[in-house]
Image: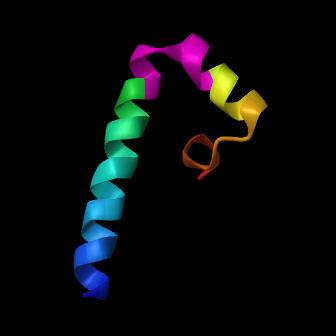
Amino acid sequence: MLLTSYTSYKKEKMKAFNYDLKNPAKKTTHIKNGGPIVHM
């Protein structure tokens, strides 16, 4: 159960990471707003 949630967690993280790479302006906004995904 832990492994499954961790795998999906990493998948979501990578998705958000790739999305931020395509939208640098949005990434800065996320950091300013304290978005946890960008920081980690």
| 29, above or below 35, in the image | above
Q: Where does the image place residue 28, in percent across and percent down from the top left?
A: 67, 21
Give coordinates of residue 5: x percent, y percent: 30, 74
Q: Main secondary structure of the magenta part?
A: helix
Taking the image as shown, residue 33 lies to the left or right of residue 26, namely: right
Q: Quadrant of the N terminus?
A: bottom left
Q: Quadrant of residue 30?
A: top right
The residue furthest bottom is 1
**What span is colored magenta in the figure?**
20-27
Q: Residue at point 34% right, 45% down?
A: 14
Q: Residue at x 58, y 24 (%)?
A: 27
Tell me if residue 36 comes above or below residue 4 in the rendering: above
Total count of labels: 0
In this picture, residue 12 sits left or right of residue 24: left
Q: Residue at x 59, y 11 (%)?
A: 25
Compared with 22, 27 (above or below) is below
Q: Position of residue 13 (x, y in %)?
A: 39, 49
Q: Is 16 contained in the magenta span?
A: no
Q: Quadrant of residue 8?
A: bottom left
